[in-house]
Image: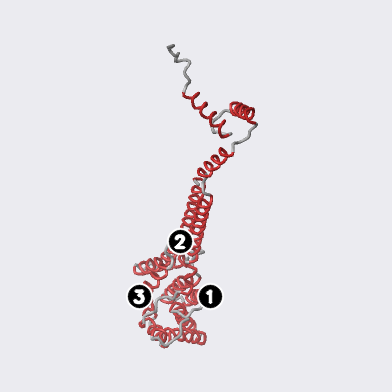
Amino acid sequence: MIARRRFFSFVLASCAAVALACSEDRGAPAVEARNWIAQGEAAHFEAQQRLSLGDIQGARAALDSAVRLAPPRIAEAGDVRVVRQDLFYQLASLELEHGRPEDAVRFATEGLALGAAEDAFTANLQIARGRALERTGDAISAARDYHAALVISEALLERSLGHGKKP
Amino acid sequence: MREEDPADLPTDEERREAEALARALDRGNAPGVPDDALQAAAFLRYSKDGGALDPDRAAALFDDAMARARKPGVASRKGWLLGFLGLATAGAATWMAAVGLESSPQETAGNELPAPPAALLAAQVEIATNRSAPLAALDARTDEYRASVYAALKGRYRP
């Protein structure tokens, strides 16, 4: 009887150890993903701070290094796209503001290559690329991007009013 | 009367062995009896009556043995109950671990972002339709929206 009790105590202790190990396995990558997202957010603050000091190159470097950071495997693809598209938008906007529309087109195109979604970040990139293409003289491509952005904005507006369908 | 020499008196160990031997002679077995003594007891018993057991004595031994015997049914039921509880606990722990793993961020793929404010959508429409509208207006509205989006994204990856 004592041996049986010892056996079941052993089984229970083993189960508890397995459950603990699983929760630890889950915790570490989640922290990694949070940190990766926080680094993206911090890059926006750093870029704005550097721009306010006139350090355009520093702002560009902060955004560029953040957008090149490899996301952790646990990070969901849609979340990775949002963070990176937002950083690419900021890069494109910075280049446009400082007279480099070709670079703005390049960054916006790179961001849009991550995927299109019916959200504000994809729409922002299409607007930024449209504005950059307009500056380079490619009005037709610009109009195409503006139209795509307007379709998204309209859908988001409809959804916010409760008329649209959920994606 | 002659005084007994203390050296002649049996020791406690000798007494115990003698009692065990007496029991062995009576019952045919006893714990703690040396093998050679047990063999001697068996030989004496066999030489006395050829190992035959009196029917009354046999009945008494049987009743005594039954009274001392453990009830196997009860012990078995307890064993099954403990086994079942152990398995149920192991299953529950495995299930909890599995559910915990499934609730990792992959499951949040369907989670929506916070709804963008109307001011941001209005800025998007304005800039997409008016070439003289500054992009800085869109930057400002996006900054406001960004805080809530990043808070939601980080909230999906709680350890």
Q: Mark number for residue A113?
A: 1
Q: CA distance from mark 2 to mark 1?
A: 25 Å
Looking at the image, residue A48 lies above or below residue B120: above
**Few, some or many residues within 10 Å of mark 3 (<14, 14–19, 20+):** some
Q: Check if mark 1's residue and mark 3's residue have beta carbons within 8 Å.
A: no
Which one is nearer the viewer's eye here, B135 or A114? A114
Element under label 3?
Answer: helix
Element under label 1?
Answer: loop
* Residue B32 drawn at (x, y percent): 54, 31
> Which residue in the structure is indicated by mark 3?
B144
| Rendered image quadrant of residue B128 | bottom left
> Which residue in the structure is indicated by mark 2?
A32
Picture residue at 49% right of the left edge, 70% below the top: B107
Element under label 2?
Answer: helix
Q: CA distance from mark 1 to mark 3?
A: 25 Å
Query: Which amino acid is tagged 2?
Result: Glu
| Foreground: disc 3 or disc 2 | 2
| Foreground: disc 2 or disc 1 | 2
* Residue A33 drawn at (x, y percent): 46, 64
Query: Which amino acid is tagged 3?
Result: Glu
Which one is nearer the viewer's eye here, B51 or B149? B51
* Residue B16 drawn at (x, y percent): 49, 27
Q: Which chain letter goes with mark 2?
A: A
